[in-house]
Image: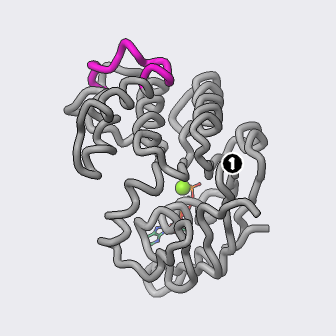
Amino acid sequence: MPEVVIQAAGVRKNYLSGDRTLEVLQGVDFSVAAGETVSIRGESGSGKSTLLNILAGLDRPDSGELFWGGEAAHKLSLGELTGRRGRFLGMVFQSYYLIPEIDALANVLMSARILGGVGATERARAAALLQRVGLGERGHHLPTHLSGGERQRVAVARALMNRPKLILADEPTGNLDERTGDEVISLLLEVCAEEKTALVLVTHNPSHAKRTSRQLLLQSGRFV
Ligand SMILES: Nc1ncnc2c1ncn2[C@@H]1O[C@H](COP(=O)(O)OP(=O)(O)OP(=O)(O)O)[C@@H](O)[C@H]1O
Ligand SMILES: [Mg+2]
């Protein structure tokens, strides 16, 4: 049986909106095997980002279970999750979230810095990743001197820096034109395959969704 990288069982999440309760996730069951690629589609407001944030341990479900590898993540505090997240998973967001004051290489290295030391091994890994995403000559450029597509490539390299088991990508092409978006998705799929990293891709783009090995649709708080 393939190793399970992440698993959610019966995940529920409500938000209060004035005096109304929004039942966003109503019992989501989900698991991803090692190296697998999965896309999630769903209408705006269907809870895709809410689910991704829960999977990432950035937010907590109201009820349900979450396993990171074999570990019961739902039993950990947010602080404990933060301590483990950097080793376990990488994230890519629509708005890149690069640190504007530091160059591309330093942004990639930030993943390693969070875990502790940055030495020659980490610098070599970061430089190799930048090379791999086509930015070998741009390591010393600030994010503001890079195009949107280039910034997202830096974000992909940063997400892979610590050799995570899983990458969670929330509409990574949402701010990019069609051709650049297609290129970023191709790159993401290629590097995840090379690094044997599983990928969960939230996207509104049906042609991007079709490129993963499994496609899911979030509707009325559940996968259908
Ligand atoms: N912190 C919050 N407080 C209250 N309501 C929230 C909060 N976060 C999200 N919501 C609501 O929960 C629902 C799901 O939001 P979410 O961002 O997960 O949707 P989404 O599927 O990612 O949408 P999109 O495709 O537009 O990114 C929405 O109705 C949203 O308004
Ligand atoms: Mg969203």
Q: Nearer the viewer, residue 51 or 68?
A: 68
Query: 181 or 164, which lies in front?
Result: 164
Horizontally, residue 195 falls left or right of residue 103, namely: right
Residue in the foreground of this view, choosing between 70 and 57 = 70
Which residue is pictured at 50% across the width and 78% down the height?
Answer: 72
Badge 1 marks a residue whose secondary structure is: strand
132 drawn magenta: yes
The N terminus, quarter of image: bottom right
> In the image, 212: left or right of 184?
right
Q: Position of residue 9 (x, y in %)?
A: 64, 78
Badge 1 is on which residue?
37
- For disc 1, the neighbor class at 10 Å (few under 14, some 14 to 19, many from 20) is many
How far across and how far down the image is residue 20, in percent? 51, 85
In the rendered image of this protein, does residue 209 appear above or below residue 2?
A: above
Which residue shows up at 55% across the image and 66% down it?
69
Dominant SS of magenta comes to loop
Q: Nearer the viewer, residue 174 or 8?
A: 8
In the image, the segment drawn in magenta is 130-143
206 vs 66: above or below = above
> Please, is residue 216 above or below residue 145 in the view?
below
How many badges with numbers are in the image? 1
Residue 132 location (% of width, % of height):
50, 23
Q: Residue at x 66, y 46 (%)?
A: 204
Q: Residue at x 64, y 31 (%)?
A: 190
Q: Which quarter of the picture shows residue 192?
A: top right
Relative placement, left or right, of 29 versus 5 is: right
Q: Which amino acid is tagged 1?
A: Thr
In the orientation shown, which residue stands out farthest toward the left? 101
Residue 126 image point, x, y percent:
36, 30
Quadrant (top left, top right, bottom left, bottom right) of the C terminus: bottom right
